[in-house]
Amino acid sequence: ELKNLTSQYNISIYAIGGFVRDLLLGQSNYDLDIVVEGDIQLVISKIIDKWQSKVITHPQFGTSEILLNDRKRIDIATARIEYYEEPGSLPKVERSSLWLDLKRRDFTINALAMSLNEENFGEIIDLYGGLEDLTRKELRVLHNLSFIEDPTRILRGVRLEVRLGFNFEEKTFKLLKEAIENGFLNKIAKERLKDEIFLILQEPQPEKVLKRLEELNALSYILPVKRLPKNFEKKNQILRREFPEKLELHILNIISEADTEEGKKWLQDLKFPKKVLYQFILLKKYENTNTLSEKDIKSLLDLPNDLLLLLSLTAKKIGKNILRIKLLKEKGVPYLKGEDLINMGFKGKIIGDLLKKLFLKHYYGEVKSKEDEEKIIKE
Ligand code: CTP
């Protein structure tokens, strides 16, 4: 469809970046980045007509996002403004705006473009040797200052290294290590850092990315810890399996061994919701607790299952007990519900107390069935 537009309206369209990289690697990618040279509004309106999609424009960046169905997205960048001022020199500006776009990129494998134009559809534009690096499975920066100019590229690089199973090219790796050692990760603005951390968590293997960052001594610049917690990989996989969407829970696991004050400060600096801060404090409270009192059990009962699972993984001595509370809650004990107790003639606050008492009996293994519960209530 885009190809037809290019011949009809004298427009050039190129796919660029991760989409081209993944296409050449035979991997799926739902985000298509295109550079349009010519009337971008026309391209946008044609896409909307064709696929009834939603558009978000970012005028400050000269880009638009088109959201298609099935999670698919098209990011469109416009040609530079000079194009409109000098329509006579179209071919020259056309070329240079694509070049400029590619020149600003992080790694050679992300600086490939593919023509979507009728006359040479599918042709790869490879200005920096990205095709060769793709076959060598190497990540290579376009210039020596790449990580310094934008230190988030350190994190992007490690994500790609793990996700694609690539290696850093020798000189790039040296530059990466130097940028880390010289503290450039500290320069990432808090808001962006938070985004980058969430991107790590959404990788297919976030544990491996974090392990690699630990190995590179990069963790302490982005998190309130130098090392990952004990058995981190296993714990995080359990959390991801049971609660894949709860990324804040995964973060709490990662920082679970942080010093309490440092952890709190980090969560506040990165503007996590208050709820997350309280959950971190709770986690630290139970971290070294030796025994659970009845009062503890009653208050733990009010917590959501995701948090109980996390606590069961981070509380060193009473993890099993907390897990037991979670499992019992899931089983739906007590079997007697509030209305059963009302029918038995109970009223008011006592109902809640009785239900908690029944729960405790389950917790200590003293009751197994509804009949056992009824017997206790009668007594
Ligand atoms: N980019 C960059 N420096 C950054 C962020 C992005 O050079 N700090 C460039 C990269 O070349 C990337 C492109 O912008 O290819 C688009 O960024 P994004 O959509 O975030 O990345 P993708 O490469 O599509 O990677 P992913 O598969 O992780 O989405």
Image (cartoon, rainbow, N blue to C red):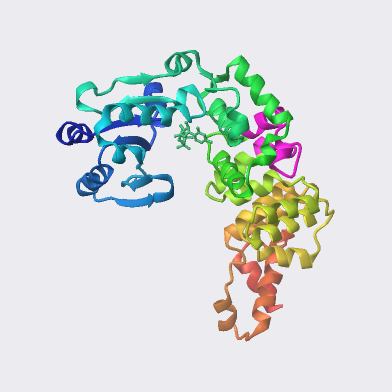
- In percent of width and height, residue 339 lies at 55, 78
- In percent of width and height, residue 144 lies at 60, 22
- Residue at 78% over, 66% down: 294
Image quadrant containing the N terminus = top left
State the residue in front, 126 or 82.
82
- Residue at 23% over, 46% down: 51
State the residue in front, 323 or 237.
237
| The quadrant where residue 162 appears | top right
- In percent of width and height, residue 31 lies at 38, 38
Please say if 97 is above or below 239.
above
The residue furthest left is 8
The magenta segment is 208-234
Horizontal side of 262 relative to 55 (left or right) equals right
| The quadrant where residue 93 appears | top left
Viewer can see residue 78: no
- In percent of width and height, residue 279 lies at 69, 58
Please say if 278 is above or below 251.
below
| The quadrant where residue 307 appears | bottom right
Please say if 204 is above or below 338.
above
Specify whether residue 33 is painted magenta. no
Viewer can see residue 21: yes
Image quadrant containing the C terminus = bottom right
Horizontal side of 100 relative to 207 (left or right) equals left
Horizontal side of 223 relative to 114 (left or right) equals right
